[in-house]
Amino acid sequence: MTSAPPQTKTTKQRLPLWAAVALSLATIGPTLAMAGNGQGLIGIVGKSIPLVFIIGLIGVALVGYGFVRLTRHLNHAGSAYALVGGTIGPRAGFFSGFAMLGAYIGFSIGTLALTAAFVNAFLAELQRGSSDPFQLPWPVITIVGAVISFLLAGRDVALIAKILLAIEGVGIVAMIVLVGVIFANGGAPSTGVDFSVFSFDGVDVSQVMAGVVAAFLSWAGFEACASLGEETDNPKRNIPRALGGALVLTGVLFIVVMFAQTIGFGTDAAGLEKFQTSGNTLGDLGHDYIGTWFGLIIIFTAICAAFGCHVATAATAGRMIYAFTRDGFGPAALAVLDEKTQGPRRATWLVIALALISGLICSVAGWPVMGTGNPAIDAYFLFAVAGAVCLMVAYFMVEIAAIWFTGNKRFDIVHGGEGRFLGIVLPAIGAIVIAVVLWFNVKDATEPTAAPLLGLYWCLAGLILALAASRIAVRVGEALTAELELPGLGKELDPREKAAQS
């Protein structure tokens, strides 16, 4: 740990609105979410996956409202770390940032593994009809992916955003075409269009709420554009717009696509089993309803989406590590921007190395076993679910921060109290939803290495550090306050605030 915040220059790029939206879309990875997140839900909620996604969208929208409230006033490379720290205080901000960092490290590990799974699904599609298709060892694919990611790290953000947005654009178009064909065919011949997937038929509330974490996982990254607050043009206007745009676009898409996939496979036992054991659901449905050529196209876009999500989450985690170390927590060597690209390349390299090493360890150890029958997908679900729990803890803190900010005297000065009721009630409901979902996911966890518990272990470590490293937390808070240009901690109060306090 450093003894004082290292001196580094701040980023100078001014990114347009579309670049912020692109980073959030790329981090969400719609094609990845729809091709790889449904399988793990079948054993929990059966055919009621679309219902899970409706509840998930409500929860994520409430969280998004909290982000919008805060990013209208605060923008920083640390995202939740800064939003919570700039409102509640340095220790709460440190804890939130540590939780979110764990989430994005988990996602970068998981999506690198899932990239390998999708590559092998593509190879299997090329050999459809073979009883023993050739497959590459998944650690080899992760090594190649990590090398490419290593070379891309710290590159121009706008250029990466263009590439990732183009990849996701192809995937989204392919999904829309597939959905249209499934609807036109009336779903699977055995069960047809079954609207009972939007009901609790065959499942209870506890099962559905336990499955909502996977829905949150699908939207994970919608707030990634908040980490570009220091680099985006007019951030107090464009960052909230990017947050809202990413949620609206993906919300409608996810519910419709999951409904189409569920009825496309069929809602009977045979259809659900095929759904659960699919290596790439979009690719399998594309082959069944359109043809092998379409299946290959959509699997290829899923490969690109998974790898793009890895790149985006590694970049986001790298930016957060940079924000931590810049403000005094961590080695000064990571608090450096590349002179050419103005990106935190060293910090991003660290995240990529962690992703590669974790994947290799899982491969050698034959762990985890999550029931999918595919070790790469097992590794994805372990780290992705653990990361989703970390993210939900960070989201919970953002909701508390939004309530805190709305009830603060500074809010009255800026807004005259307008919008206070919604600014308190909606984040409060969001915090309750998150707490309930987390409870249903950890209450029945019996194995100490269960994915939800791994996420909580990381968050507990962050809480201990926030409480034990009090002097560091104060230094981080002072640097954070100065960078956000908030009054307090040694800075002169705004005259309006002086008047309000007198």
Image (cartoon, grey):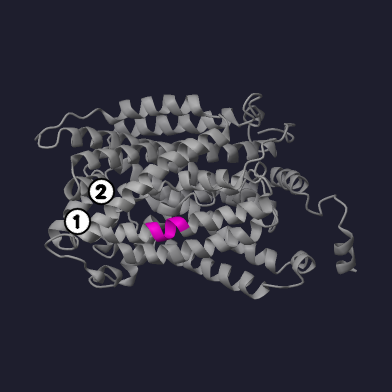
Which is nearer the eye, 292 or 100? 292
Quarter of the image that includes the N terminus: top right
Magenta segment includes 362: no
Residue occupied by mark 1: 265
Q: In which quarter of the view is residue 202 placed?
A: bottom left
Tell me, yes or no, if residue 62 can be seen here. yes
In the rendered view, tell whether residue 23 sits above or below residue 344. Answer: below
Return the disc, 1 or 2, that comes first in the chain's sequence.
1
Q: In this view, does 262 lie to the left or right of 429?
A: left
Q: Which mark is residue 93?
A: none
Residue type of the residue flagged with mark 1: Phe
Q: Distance between the residues labelled 1 and 2?
A: 9 Å
The residue tagged 2 is 281
Local crowd size for mark 2, using a 10 Å CA cut-off: few (<14), some (14–19), many (≥20) = many
Instruction: State left or right for residue 498 relative to residue 320.
Output: right
CB atoms of marks 1 and 2 within 8 Å: yes
Query: From what the image shows, is residue 424 above or below residue 104?
Result: below
Q: What element carries label 1?
A: helix
Q: For the point 45% across and 56% down, which residue is it?
A: 249
Residues in magenta, as a range: 249-253
Q: Residue at x 30, y 51 (%)?
A: 177
Q: x, y percentage for residue 43?
A: 24, 58
